[in-house]
């Protein structure tokens, strides 16, 4: 019998569902991973690791805004069916004025959340931290693939996109990215050479933002437990700084952390992913107080 998933920071969460701002949605989807497997276990690993977090994140107490953990999305069936279930779940969260926090699972899960957010709010911008561009039109014959999720977002939902940390992409993706005025980027090579600029996002980037963090966007020295741990990624504090800069003057309406493929011998990766989820909640809390 499978052990039920724990709630995020369960030992500290006593707020009622209706009063919690952050609604955590586990989405253990794993259908199109192309190298190392294990992302289906990512949500559980993050939730279990969250039990060891400090409620005070060093700057604020995001827990005070309330965190509610939903039942996991059923991830049987086709990719389209799973994405639809994620969209439906996020639609319910958004309709009650809450912020969906999706835990993957493979990166395809983001499309369901993005569809719900666009239906709820209209024009939004997507901030993506990732080692890969995920802009292929199809991969291994699939259009609903982790390698295609940002292409679907740009083409289907017309979302402006900012990518940070990319260091592995195909020529097809590079050509597509360069052909799109709506896509801007700060690749890992440029980041290493010149650092993080004062202004990260284009001035006309939408006020409403959805964040998607593939954990392979961080360097393997920070998070190694992922399907494709590409060297040369963001350091921990580079990642946090980029996220904080993208939030400045904008409102985050949802976010996800995806592609953790936990390893029982590597507690550090799971803990770092849980800490990242909680730190993003803290940034949202602090940003709300300044707007």
Image: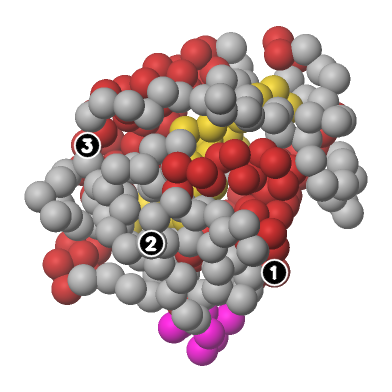
Q: Which of 65 and 25 is in front in this view?
A: 25
Q: Where is residue 85 in the image (x, y as percent from the top left)?
A: 37, 21
The residue identified by callout 2 is 36
Q: Where is the N terminus found, in terms of image quarters?
A: top right
Which residue corresponds to the image point at 59% horizontal and 39% vertical from the top-left?
44
Dot 2: what SS? loop
* Label 3, label 2: how far apart the Cα atoms are: 28 Å
* Label 2, label 1: how far apart the Cα atoms are: 26 Å
Left or right side of 219 for 112: left
Q: Taking the image as drawn, is residue 29 in sight?
A: yes
Number of residues whose C-alpha sits closer than 10 Å to that of mark 3, classed few (under 14), some (14–19) or many (20 or more): few
Q: Give the range drawn in magenta.
A: 189-195
Give the foreground label among 2 and 1: 2
Q: Taking the image as drawn, is residue 127 in sight?
A: no
The residue identified by callout 3 is 156
The dot on residue 262 is none
Q: Which residue lies furthest to the bottom in this view?
A: 193
Q: Which residue lies furthest to the front in this view?
A: 1
Colouring chosen for the image of the structure? secondary structure
Dot 1: what SS? helix
Give the foreground label among 3 and 2: 2
Q: Is residue 214 found inside the magenta-colored segment of the image?
A: no
Circle 2/circle 1 CB separation < 8 Å: no
Which residue corresponds to the image point at 27% horizontal and 55% vertical from the top-left?
147
- Residue 71, picture quadrant: top right
The residue identified by callout 1 is 237
Q: Where is residue 7 in the image (x, y as percent from the top left)?
A: 70, 28
Number of residues whose C-alpha sits closer than 10 Å to that of mark 2, classed few (under 14), some (14–19) or many (20 or more): few
């Amino acid at each position: 019998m499978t052990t039920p998933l724990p709630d995020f920071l369960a030992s500290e969460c006593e707020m009622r569902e209706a009063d919690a701002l952050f609604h955590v949605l586990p989405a253990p989807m794993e259908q199109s991973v192309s190298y190392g497997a294990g992302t289906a276990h990512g949500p559980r690993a993050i939730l279990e690791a969250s039990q060891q977090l400090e409620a005070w994140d060093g700057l604020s107490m995001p827990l005070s805004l309330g965190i509610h953990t939903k039942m996991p999305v059923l991830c049987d069936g086709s990719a389209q069916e799973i994405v639809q279930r994620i969209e439906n779940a996020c639609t319910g969260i958004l309709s009650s004025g809450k912020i969906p926090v999706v835990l993957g699972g493979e990166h395809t899960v983001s499309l369901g959340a993005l569809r719900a957010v666009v239906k709820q709010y209209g024009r939004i911008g997507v901030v993506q931290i990732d080692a890969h561009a995920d802009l292929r039109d199809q991969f291994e014959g699939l259009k609903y693939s982790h390698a295609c999720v940002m292409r679907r977002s740009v083409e289907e939902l017309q979302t402006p996109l900012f990518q940070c940390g990319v260091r592995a992409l195909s020529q097809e993706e590079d050509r597509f990215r360069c052909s799109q005025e709506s896509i801007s980027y700060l690749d890992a090579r440029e980041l290493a050479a010149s650092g993080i600029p004062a202004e990260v996002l284009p001035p006309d980037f939408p006020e409403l933002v959805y964040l998607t963090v593939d954990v392979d966007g961080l360097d393997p020295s920070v998070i190694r437990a992922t399907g494709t741990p590409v060297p040369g990624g963001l350091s921990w504090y580079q990642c946090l700084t980029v996220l904080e800069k993208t939030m400045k003057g904008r409102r985050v309406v949802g976010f996800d952390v995806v592609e953790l493929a936990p390893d029982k011998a590597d507690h550090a990766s799971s803990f770092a992913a849980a800490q990242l989820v909680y730190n993003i909640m803290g940034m949202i809390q602090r940003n709300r107080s300044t707007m």
